[in-house]
C-alpha cells in the first residue's frame, strides 16, 4: 500500500529489509539502504515523487545520459548525534548548488524546499541506517540523469531525480591518517568557461586517468592545477584544499573552474569563529613549494563532505617529494576537524544553524 505525504510524495510500503552491515565494516559508498527517492520529469514538469524500494532502473539504451553524459549529483551526510538526533549538514546549500549545476547542464531545477523536505522524509524513514561508530555517517547522494531516448545532441526533455543513501566510514582507506597527494602536471580537470564549477559526472570521468596513474605510484588523489598554465592550485579529486602558512589558512580562491565546496565555505566561517585567519588567494605551485622549503608552510588539509577534514602527509610535484608535519596530523588541521565534526555530531553548539534535525 502506498500513502501520500504532505510534500506530495508517494511512500511505498516495503516488506523485505536488507541485513545492515556492521559499523566496523563500513568503507565509503559500498552498501545502500532499503529505500530510495525517485521523481520523474516529463511533459515539461516534475511529476509526483515516490519513496520506493532501492531497485534497478529500466532505461532505453538510447537514454541520453548514456551518450552525452547529462548527469549531475550532490553529496551530503546525515550524522547520528550523541543525543540520538539525526542531523543533515547544510542541505539548503546542496539544494542551491544542485540547481546551479542543473542550469549549467541545461537540466530542470528543483524547488529548494522540495529537495530538503524529501531528504528529511527519506532519511527519517531510513534513520536506522545511520551508523553509530565514531566517524561514520549516512552518505546521501541526490542525482539527476537525462532519461529521454534520442541521439541528437540537445538537452533531454525527460529526467530522473533520485536519492540513494549509503552508510559510510572514512572516504580514504587510511582513515584520518595523513594521505598522500600527487600534483598532476600533465592532465587538467577543468578550464575557465568549462563545467568545473558544476557537480557533473563528466568532470569525474575525465579525472580518472590521472587518478589511476597516481594510485599506481601510491598516491590517494591528485591535486589539480589550473587548466591554462598548469601553475595555480585548484583542488583535489574529491575535495577542496587548504594550506597552513605562518599559522594562517590559505585556500585557492574560487576561479570559476573549482567546485565551490560547502565544507570549504564552512571552514572559512569556522576559522573566523576560532580566530584563525582563512584567506582565499591565487596560489602557485612554485609558491607552495617555496613555502614548504622555507618552513613557513606547516600543514596541508583537504576539505569536503566525503573527505571531511583530511590531513595531507605527503605532496609530490614532478620529482620533488615533500613530507608535511612529519606525516602527522597538524594542530590546525586537528582544530578544524574537531570543530566541524563537533557541530555535525552535536558536541558543539550549532551557532550558524547549519544542522537540519531530521523529524
Ligand atoms: N571538489 C570536488 C571535486 C568534490 O568532488 C568535492 C566533494 O563534493 C569537493 C570539492 C568538496 O565539496 P563539498 O564540501 O561541498 O562536499
Ligand atoms: C562528496 O564529498 O560528497 C563528493 O561528492 C566527493 C566524491 C565522493 C565524488
Image (cartoon, helix red, strand yellow):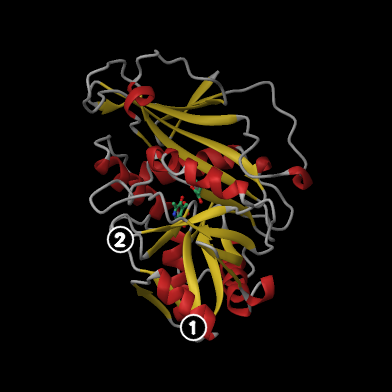
Q: Position of residue 294 (x, y in %)?
A: 52, 85
Which of label 1 and label 2 is nearer to you? 2
- Residue 68 relative to residue 34: left or right: left
Q: Position of residue 208 (x, y in %)?
A: 48, 41
Depicted 120 relative to depicted 183: above or below: above
The furthest residue to the front: 319
Where disc 2 sits, the SS reads: loop
Where disc 1 sits, the SS reads: loop
Mark 2 surroundings within 10 Å by alpha-carbon count, few (fewer than 14), some (14 through 19), many (20 or more): few
Q: Position of residue 18 (x, y in %)?
A: 71, 28
Work out whether residue 169 or residue 161 is closer to the camera in this orientation and state it: 169
Number of numbered markers:
2
- Residue 185 relative to residue 23: left or right: left
Work out whether residue 88 or residue 297 is closer to the camera in this orientation and state it: 297
Residue 250: image quadrant is: bottom left
- The answer to whether residue 152 is visible is yes
Depicted 340 relative to depicted 305: above or below: below
For the point 41% across and 38% down, the residue is 201
User: Marks 2 and 1: in contact by CB < 8 Å?
Assistant: no
> On the image, numbered disc 1 is attached to which residue?
276
For the point 22% across and 24% down, the residue is 153
> On the image, numbered disc 2 is attached to which residue?
229
Which quadrant: the N terminus? top right
Depicted 241 relative to depicted 70: above or below: below
Work out whether residue 194 or residue 114 is closer to the camera in this orientation and state it: 194
- Residue 323 relative to residue 157: left or right: right
Depicted 211 relative to depicted 151: above or below: below
Amino acid at each position: 500500500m502506498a500513502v501520500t505525504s504532505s510534500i506530495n510524495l508517494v511512500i511505498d510500503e516495503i516488506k523485505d529489509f536488507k541485513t545492515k552491515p556492521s559499523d566496523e565494516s563500513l568503507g565509503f559508498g559500498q552498501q545502500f539502504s532499503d529505500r530510495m527517492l525517485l521523481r520523474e520529469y516529463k511533459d515539461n514538469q516534475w511529476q509526483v515523487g515516490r519513496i520506493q524500494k532501492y531497485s534497478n532502473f529500466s532505461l532505453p539504451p538510447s537514454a541520453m545520459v548514456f551518450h552525452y553524459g547529462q548527469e549531475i549529483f550532490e553529496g551530503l551526510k546525515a550524522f547520528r548525534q550523541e543525543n540520538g538526533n539525526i542531523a543533515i549538514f547544510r542541505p539548503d546549500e546542496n539544494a542551491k548548488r544542485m540547481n546551479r549545476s542543473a542550469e549549467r547542464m541545461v537540466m530542470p531545477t528543483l524547488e529548494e524546499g522540495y529537495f530538503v523536505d524529501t531528504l528529511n522524509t527519506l532519511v527519517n524513514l531510513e534513520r536506522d541506517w545511520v551508523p553509530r561508530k565514531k566517524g561514520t555517517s549516512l552518505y546521501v547522494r541526490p542525482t539527476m540523469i537525462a532519461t529521454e531516448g534520442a541521439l541528437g545532441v540537445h538537452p533531454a526533455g525527460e529526467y530522473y531525480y533520485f536519492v540513494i543513501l549509503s552508510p559510510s566510514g572514512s572516504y580514504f582507506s587510511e582513515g584520518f591518517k595523513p594521505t598522500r597527494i600527487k600534483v598532476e602536471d600533465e592532465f587538467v580537470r577543468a578550464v575557465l568557461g568549462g563545467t568545473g564549477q558544476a557537480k557533473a559526472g563528466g568532470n569525474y570521468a575525465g579525472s580518472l586517468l590521472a587518478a589511476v596513474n597516481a594510485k599506481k605510484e601510491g598516491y590517494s588523489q591528485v591535486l589539480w592545477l589550473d587548466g591554462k598554465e598548469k601553475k595555480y592550485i585548484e583542488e583535489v579529486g574529491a575535495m577542496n584544499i587548504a594550506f597552513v602558512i605562518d599559522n594562517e589558512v590559505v585556500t585557492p580562491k574560487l576561479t570559476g573552474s573549482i567546485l565551490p565546496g560547502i565544507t570549504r565555505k564552512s571552514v572559512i566561517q569556522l576559522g573566523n569563529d576560532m580566530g584563525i585567519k582563512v584567506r582565499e588567494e591565487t596560489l602557485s605551485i612554485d609558491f607552495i613549494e617555496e613555502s614548504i622549503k622555507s618552513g613557513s608552510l606547516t600543514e596541508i588539509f583537504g576539505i569536503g563532505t566525503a573527505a571531511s577534514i583530511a590531513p595531507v602527509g605527503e605532496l609530490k610535484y614532478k620529482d620533488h617529494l615533500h613530507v608535511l608535519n612529519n606525516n602527522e596530523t597538524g594542530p590546525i588541521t586537528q582544530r578544524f576537524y574537531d570543530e566541524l565534526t563537533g557541530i555535525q555530531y552535536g558536541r558543539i553548539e550549532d551557532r550558524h544553524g547549519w544542522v537540519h534535525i531530521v523529524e
